[in-house]
Image (cartoon, grey):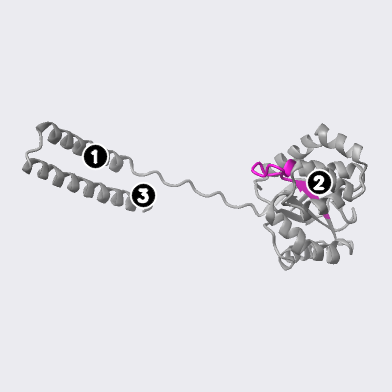
Amino acid sequence: MVIKRSSRLLKMMLSVVLMFMLVICNQSIAETVSNNRDDAILQELKQIRVLLERIEKKGLAAPAPRKPQITTAQLSTKGRPAMGKDDAPVTIVEISDYQCPYCKRFVDNTFPQLKKEYIDTGKVRLVFKDLALPFHKNARKAAQAAHCAGDQGKYWEMHDVLFKNAKQLDEKYLPEYALSISLDQDEFATCLNSNQHLDDINRSAAEVNQTGLTGTPSFVIGKTTGDVIKGDVVRGAQPFASLKIFIDKQLKLIN
């Protein structure tokens, strides 16, 4: 139906062009414009008609159908930074990017209550999975900084500092942030300059993309089952009340 309508519209537009050019042609004749110019106009009219006939025969290409959004996903949590009890009944896999403004919104507005009501009470374990988006030029280096801090036992402290300063993530600022959380500066600099965590960060992004998830923040919320979590997909910087629905659903299923 869309194709037929579009074809009719194009036909009408081309018909208007034809009429307009015929008027020009008639005016040209009336004004005794040279035969060469008249011939050129007539030739162009013929080409437009040929084009119209081709379009009518082939039809217009239909738009590609949209892929349905996935509602569940499965992700590995092995070796990823985690907060909360290992045996918490529910795991939330947070897919995030340090330079993403919506990820910062989640950290600022939703995470504090999530931590207080579910993580600190032993009901939820939070696992961080990197998805440094390619158009965020500082996201990968920031992720490396977090993992380098993790080597000194302060992953989450660096996580908090990076999101607090999300608009200043150029590499020149990272040593200052390391100093603010009392990291060994030489060890941190060696780690950051060696790119030793870069492969792991890229692997994390590849695993996420394989599930069909491409945006941040995204969350997979499911029952804690070892190193692989399968659960509901939640997209965007949702308010606490929205996440609570999915968490309570999993807790009910377990109980």
Quarter location, residue 130: top right
Amino acid carrying mark 1 in the image = Ile
Q: Residue at x 17, y 33 (%)?
A: 40
**Whether residue 85 is situated above or below residue 81 in the rendered picture:** below
As helix, strand or loop, the secondary structure at mark 2 comes to loop
> Residue 54: x percent and y percent?
28, 38
Q: Nearer the viewer, residue 31 or 139?
A: 31
Q: Which mark is residue 233?
A: none
Q: Which residue is mark 3?
A: 3
Mark 2 surroundings: few (<14), some (14-19) or many (≥20) residues within 10 A: many
Q: Is there any visible trace of residue 232 in the rendered image?
A: no
Tell me which numbered mark, 2 or 1, is placed earlier along the sequence. 1
Magenta residues (range) = 126-140
Q: Is residue 233 left or right of residue 177?
A: left
Cβ–Cβ below 8 Å for labels 2 and 1? no
Q: CA distance from mark 2 to mark 1?
A: 60 Å
Q: CA distance from mark 2 to mark 3?
A: 47 Å
Observer-side mark, 2 or 1, equals 1
Q: Nearer the viewer, residue 157 or 14?
A: 157
Tell me which numbered mark, 1 or 3, is placed earlier along the sequence. 3
Q: Which residue is mark 1?
A: 48
Q: Is residue 131 magenta?
A: yes
Amino acid carrying mark 2 in the image = Thr
> Residue 241: x percent and y percent?
73, 68
Farthest-out residue, bottom: 241
Q: Residue at x 49, y 48 (%)?
A: 65
> Residue 214: x percent and y percent?
65, 47
> Residue 253: x percent and y percent?
78, 62
Mark 3 surroundings: few (<14), some (14-19) or many (≥20) residues within 10 A: few
Q: CA distance from mark 1 to mark 3?
A: 20 Å
Q: Which residue is mark 2?
A: 77
